[in-house]
Amino acid sequence: MSAKSLTQEELLRYKQMLLFMRAKLRNEVIEMSGNALSRSRTESSGDLSSIPLHLADVGTDNYEQEFTLSLVQNSSGTLQEIDAALERINEGTYGQCENCECRIPKARLKAIPYTALCVNCAAEKEQEKRW
């Protein structure tokens, strides 16, 4: 089946959904990046002294910063996938699996509108990652 089974109205709806997701995610990435890179423990907790009360406080601060930066990295990857999906809409290949070229079910596109793979190909890819 070809990706042409999506109507122009459906494509417009997916495009609007993807644009909304991209804008929201970009704002979240900007906010998380700013918080992780610019806020120290004293700024976030209101401490008057910049000297840590305990070494565990330093460890917690470092963990929180690394965790936030990993979230930023994951979100950046999702942003790339969203941009690729928008490109597929413009090219007329949105809704078509990039691997096997079958039609991606609408239910999957609703759940993950930036997906480039059908369920079977996504499962195969995930299985390959595990090995």
Image (tube, rainbow, N blue to C red):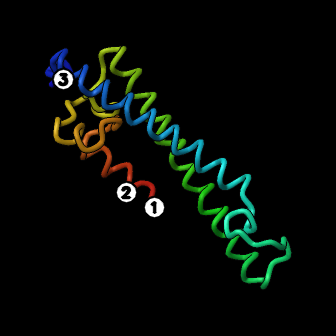
Q: Is residue 14 above or below residue 108?
A: above
User: Which residue is depicted at the point 44% across and 38% down?
Assistant: 24
CB-based contact (under 8 Å), mark 3 and mark 2? no
Q: Is residue 60 above or below residue 91?
A: below
Q: Nearer the viewer, mark 3 or mark 2?
A: 3
Residues at marks 1 and 2, CA–CA distance in whole angstroms: 7 Å
**Residue 25 in the figure: left or right of residue 125:** right
Identify the disc placed on residue 42.
none
Which of disc 2 and disc 3 is earlier in sequence? 3
Q: Nearer the viewer, mark 3 or mark 1?
A: 3
Circle 1 residue: 131
Q: Is residue 96 above or below residue 30?
A: above
CB-based contact (under 8 Å), mark 3 and mark 1? no
Identify the disc placed on residue 127.
2
User: Which residue is depicted at the point 52% across and 37% down?
Assistant: 26
Circle 3 residue: 10
Q: Quadrant of residue 39?
A: bottom right
Q: Position of residue 29 (x, y in %)?
A: 56, 44
The amino acid marked with disc number 3 is Glu
